[in-house]
Image (cartoon, rainbow, N blue to C red):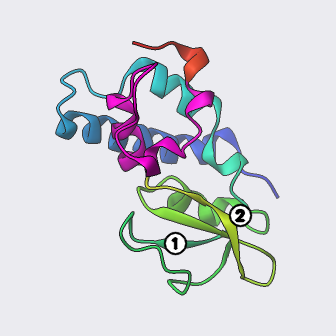
Amino acid sequence: MTSTREQIAPHMARFLVMLDAAFRRYGVSDGLPERFRNAVTATPRHMFVHRFRMSGGPLRDRIDEGAVRDNDADPVRELADIYSDAVMIHVDASGERLPSTNSQPSYVFCGLAAWRPGGMAASSRVARYSVTALLPLGSS
């Protein structure tokens, strides 16, 4: 079973609104920059999230929070969580932690807003995000 564009659209729209609001809270008066909006829509989260556990944010990174969620088994059911502002900790088929996470989106993207080519990222945690996926879309 795969999710359809119609099933994904409301989650993606809510996700983009959440990111826009986070940028505005961060002090970016125009909200989510177009290059970030394009990056989000070009690389939808549900395409690279398989099995995961939810975590509450960058300061709470414990593997024992919540049940294993399997996007491959039921992609429609997991869309709300995948397109939320929570940390997703990737796990294997047995539920054991993998050396990979999806960081809290608002935290990452607002950190990227402070990043400039040739400079330092806002934090080392932000620097670990795949900045290279965003660079070809333009930089300022």
Residue 33: x percent and y percent? Answer: 37, 22
Q: Nearer the viewer, mark 1 or mark 2?
A: 1
Amino acid at dot 1: Met
Pointer 1 residue = 54
Horizontally, is 91 left or right of 85 in the view? right
Residue interval drawn in magenta: 106-134
Whether tag 1 and tag 2 are in contact, CB under 8 A, the answer is no
Pointer 2 residue = 71
Horizontally, is 8 left or right of 103 in the view? right
Q: Residues within 10 Å of mark 1 (few under 14, many from 20)?
A: many
Q: Is residue 124 magenta?
A: yes
Residue 38: x percent and y percent? Answer: 53, 23
Quadrant position of residue 135: top right
**Element assignment for label 1:** strand
Residue 23: x percent and y percent? Answer: 27, 35
Give me the C-alpha separation between circle 1 and circle 2: 13 Å
**Element assignment for label 2:** loop
Pick the residue in front: 110 or 115: 115
